[in-house]
Image: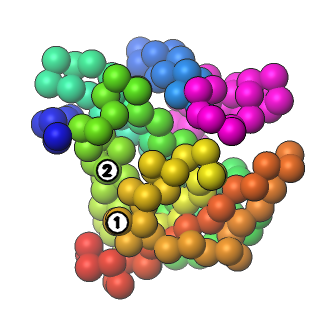
Amino acid sequence: MTVQLTIRDLRTEEFDALGRLMVGVYSQLEGFPTPEEQPRYYELLANIGRFTEKKDARVLVALTPKGELVGGIVYFGEMAEYGSGGTATAEKNASGIRLLGIDPQFRGIGAGKALTLACIRAAEEKGHAQVILHTTQSMRVAWQMYERLGFERSEDLDFLQQGFPVFGFRLMLAEAGLS
């Protein structure tokens, strides 16, 4: 089921609500590190609005027609600001996506796809050749959605975050048929 969602930039007054949503979503992922195991990661999630301060970064949110906050994602038009481990921050002619999170009560309505497609469009508008993201085994639903959208595994982007495997993906925009 797809619902007509509004995708737009996060507003300052929504920073805390999106931060709480993100912490809730990620802390419930089976097999994902807990807030006790990776407190700095959860601090990053709680303060997701701070990404709006980074050069060429945007935090996008999805809202229902009633204005309910469904989820969010961070788009990076400048990979140097991406802030992950591994080699992704050195990638050129690329945009990045991080921290997709959807409130469990709104899963299955197309919000993750809509947010990801908005990021792909932003990369195309910048004229970038590729979009890079990372995911984990705990995020299989998102992993499968990314693959359906044309993202392919890129082992050269993999890294360990405090011993936890993180898997790189890239979408070549010319090959994706989305440009």
* Amino acid at circle 1: Leu
The image position of residue 3, as x and y in percent, is 15, 36
User: Residue 56: in sight, yes or no?
Assistant: no
Residue 174 against residue 133 in the figure, above or below: below
Image quadrant containing the C terminus: bottom left
Q: Is residue 179 magenta?
A: no
Highlighted magenta segment, given as a residue range: 27-54
Residue at (68%, 74%) from the top-left corner? Answer: 155
Residue at (27%, 19%) from the top-left corner? Answer: 68
The circle drawn on residue 31 is: none
Task: Name the secondary structure under disc 1.
Answer: loop
Task: Name the secondary structure under disc 2.
Answer: helix
Residue at the limit of the structure toward the bottom, as seen here: 175
Residue 41 location, quadrant: top right
The image position of residue 86, as x and y in percent, is 76, 63
**Residue at numbered disc 2:** 113
Instruction: Give the spatial CA distance, label 1 vs label 2.
Output: 8 Å
Residues 129 and 103: in front is 103
User: Residue 135: in sight, yes or no?
Assistant: yes
Q: Are marks 1 and 2 in contact (CB under 8 Å)?
A: yes
* Amino acid at circle 2: Lys
**Residue at numbered disc 1:** 149
The image position of residue 101, as x and y in percent, is 47, 36
Q: Is residue 31 magenta?
A: yes
Instruction: Give the crowd class for mark 1: few <14, some 14-19, many >=20 residues within 10 Å.
Output: some
Residue 88 against residue 62 in the figure, above or below: below
The image position of residue 134, as x and y in percent, is 60, 57
Instruction: Give the crowd class for mark 2: few <14, some 14-19, many >=20 residues within 10 Å.
Output: some
Residue 147 location, quadrant: bottom left
Residues 60 and 77: in front is 60
